[in-house]
Amino acid sequence: MKVKKNLLKTYCIYFFILILFLFSFNNFSSIKTCKAFETNTFFVGGTGDEHYSKIQEAIDNSKENDTVIVFDGIYKESIVVNKSINLIGSNRNNVFINGNDSLYVFLIKSSYVNISGFTIMGGKIGIFVSGSEFLFNNFSGNNISNNSECIRFVNTSNNKIFDNIIQSQSNFGIILYESCNNTISENFLVDNGKAISINKWSDNNEIYKNNLTENEFGISFDFSYNNLVFENYIRNNSYGVYLTNSKINNITNNYIQFNQKCGIFSSNSDDNIIKPNNFLENKQDIQLDAKPPEIKASGFEFLLLFVAIFLIICAKKFI
């Protein structure tokens, strides 16, 4: 009798365990599995029934993290990018975006935007990013030319500009205002007024392995601190590196050659590290603690001529 009771107890335990297992399995099976994050690819230009004719239309119909691929052609647009997308041209020598003299060609109003593979031209500003909430954008592999300013950052950080050919032909190549912790690397900047201009408390930026050739100013700093400048080729400019009111910048291991006025010019800029660098045949390698070149006010020569004539007339009266 005792053996039967123990056997019954054992069966009850096994049955209870079986019920628990079946209940647990049913619960697990009701849990939805996580699907991979879905992204879409949109096409602009080329051939295809679903291809867009305008880049802005494709961006407007895309979602976060989607990709827009643009085929060869000339696109006359001023484009607002207001979401995190990848915007890719098929060939930067064949995909032209002409801003038609608008304020900007690209206005970036989002973070995590990637733009590569375009010729960006014809705007007051080629790429414009303004706002502390717009971060971690990448601009690479583009030709940016014939804009008054090729790239302008205002109060933005943690962006990357690399492997671009930048030619403004009049004003600024890359200009930063109050923009920190950005990276500018491996770009070719030629025929700009100021190739790279770091202004107004733009601190902790890294500028390296760029080729700055035949600009008025290669790299200029104004009221900016603790920037790192290294391994750049700075050649055939009027001024290679130009510092005013900027301190604690590290300018080392650059090739500074054949600059017509000065390799490194520094005014009111203490505590910068500016060696070692490789200097070759600059008119002057380093000029420190000097006043910036004076610019005469308009009409100065006329005033001198007037004073001279007045003195001559007075002198004749007394002769």
Image: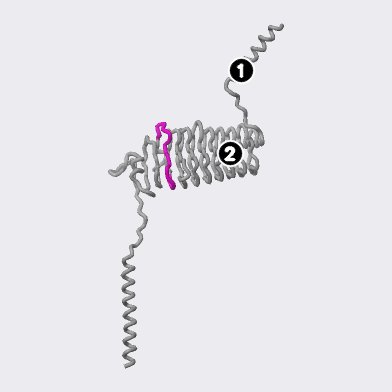
**Quarter occupied by the C terminus:** top right
Q: Secondary structure at mark 1?
A: helix
Is 95 on the left or on the right of 259, as rendered?
left
In terms of image quadrants, where is residue 120? top left
The colour scheme is: one colour
Report x, y in % for residue 213: 55, 36
Q: Amino acid at mark 2?
A: Phe
Residue indicated by mark 2: 223
Is 170 on the left or on the right of 244, as rendered?
left
Give, as a single range, the part of the protein colored magenta. Answer: 98-114
Give the farthest residue toward the left: 49
Residue 179 higher or lower than 29, as above or below: above
User: Of helix, strand and loop, which mostly describes the magenta segment?
Assistant: strand
Q: Residue at x 33, y 74 (%)?
A: 21
In terms of image quadrants, where is residue 283? top right
Q: Amino acid at mark 1?
A: Leu
Residue indicated by mark 1: 303
Of callouts 2 and 1, the N-terminal one: 2
Q: Residues within 10 Å of mark 2 (few under 14, many from 20)?
A: some
Can residue 286 be found in the magenta stretch? Answer: no
Q: Residue at x 32, y 68 (%)?
A: 27
Report x, y in % for residue 62: 35, 46
**Quarter occupied by the N terminus:** bottom left
Is 116 on the left or on the right of 195, as rendered?
left
Question: Could you tell me if residue 144 is visible in this image?
Answer: yes
Q: Secondary structure at mark 2?
A: loop
Report x, y in % for residue 40: 34, 50
